[in-house]
Amino acid sequence: MQANDLLHLAEQFGSPVYVYDAEKIQSQYNRLTKAFSKVPNLRINYAMKALSNVAILQLLRDMGSGLDTVSIQEVLLGLHAGYAPEKIFYTPNGVSLEEIEEVHALGVQINIDNLSILEQFGAKHPHVPVCIRINPHVMAGGNANISVGHIDSKFGISVHQLPHLVRIVENTDMNIVGIHMHTGSDILDIEVFLYAAEILFDAAKNFKNLEFLDFGSGFKVPYKKDDIETDIEELGKKLSKRFNAFCVEYGKDLTLIFEPGKFLVSEAGFFLAKVNVVKQTTSTVFAGIDTGFNHLIRPMLYGSQHHIENISHQKGKERFYSVVGYICETDTFATNRKITEIKEGDILCFRNAGAYCFSMASNYNSRYKPAEVLWMNGKGHLIRAHETFEDLLKNQIPLPVEAAV
Ligand SMILES: *Cc1c(COP(=O)(O)O)cnc(C)c1O
């Protein structure tokens, strides 16, 4: 997408607004399937928590993608977007047995990540095809909050508990059809990933009825110019070879599953916000924009870097700015960032705004959530309207008049 296209969309749809480039999502999807084209049975399940707009789900469904979901509400959204139940995976953490049973009743593949629920579910529903989430205890991930494979992680069944796991499966006569791991976001070292894969292969040998192995996700995408990213092509080459060899050893052509979120949608997203005020203090020039951590919380939550450009003035002298929000709390998007000179009214564009941006937005400070636009075939399609005052009041129940006085 060109900066001028984005500028027009900000004029057309108002600010702040999220814009997603359909072509980028499609090219990332194709890149991943191409890297693993040597695997006979490959399946990509889009981790929809990254960006859950129904139009995005439809776009990926039309490409043949499945869905990875973490709540029953995500399952319902997936079904609403037209996914067949068998194309949906459910990989929750710490949810109730009741929710797992409800999701199973919808025809969705369930993935269980603790021994307690596994034992209860197996005792009540033997023979149901179940996937189990293993924690291989491999340190991967760019940030402690999103690193989910390490020893103290709450995710998955520890690989050291395999003997206990196998006993539960035998005692309850469960049908284990898949093994899953997800070691965390931002994998940089392919060797670490391959090492974790070996642990999964070893664990797989304990189960006779497997149909698939799910390697989760955690592919790192570039966040700034010349930033490092997971070398998908290299990973594809090495893991495909190893996976196919394992299938021979196992005696069956298993399906290889990935569940990327960030990889598919991060770079496709742009967040556009308007500069309300330029404020010079004794030490800093602040650019205050018409948004805050209510719309984009990643910089404050994870310290994430989002490249920011001034698309109203793409050329010209650069200056250093601290870009801040309008929330009545410190909400700093960037400090001391070099940006072409900013005037009030300019539109700033945040890059990598596809994953975990809108999906983490809130109504804090009673602000409306922004609109979302899908850029497809050279045209912007509104896929979520800006909220209105009615949205803020929805579900609120005022006191009866006499009680309020
Ligand atoms: C969040 C999540 C993903 C997606 O992770 P990304 O880093 O966005 O690719 C995949 N699988 C599970 C189980 C997840 O919770």
Image (tube, rainbow, N blue to C red):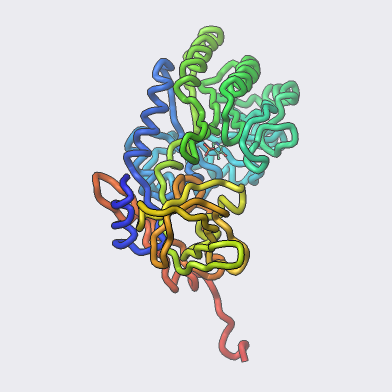
Spot occupied by residue 117 in the image (x, y as percentages of width and height): 68, 38
Query: Which residue sits at x=52%, y=55%?
Result: 320
Quarter residue 196 falls in? top right
Check the picture and name the quadrant holding the N terminus.
top left
- The correct choice, above or below, for 333 with respect to 22 in the image is below
Please give left or right for residue 239 compared with residue 138 in the image: left
Tell which of 288 and 352 is nearer to you: 288
- The correct choice, above or below, for 9 with respect to 98 in the image is below
Tell which of 137 and 189 is nearer to you: 189
Please give left or right for residue 199 compared with residue 106 in the image: right
Can residue 76 be seen at all in this image of the molecule?
A: no
Query: Which residue sits at x=60%, y=35%?
Result: 184
Quadrant where ligand 1 appears? top right
Quarter residue 385 falls in? bottom left
Tell which of 24 and 396 is nearer to you: 24
- The correct choice, above or below, for 373 with respect to 172 in the image is below
Check the picture and name the quadrant holding the C terminus.
bottom right
Spot occupied by residue 194 in the image (x, y as percentages of width and height): 58, 19
Query: Which residue sits at x=54%, y=67%?
Result: 280
Spot occupied by residue 44 in the image (x, y as percentages of width and height): 44, 30
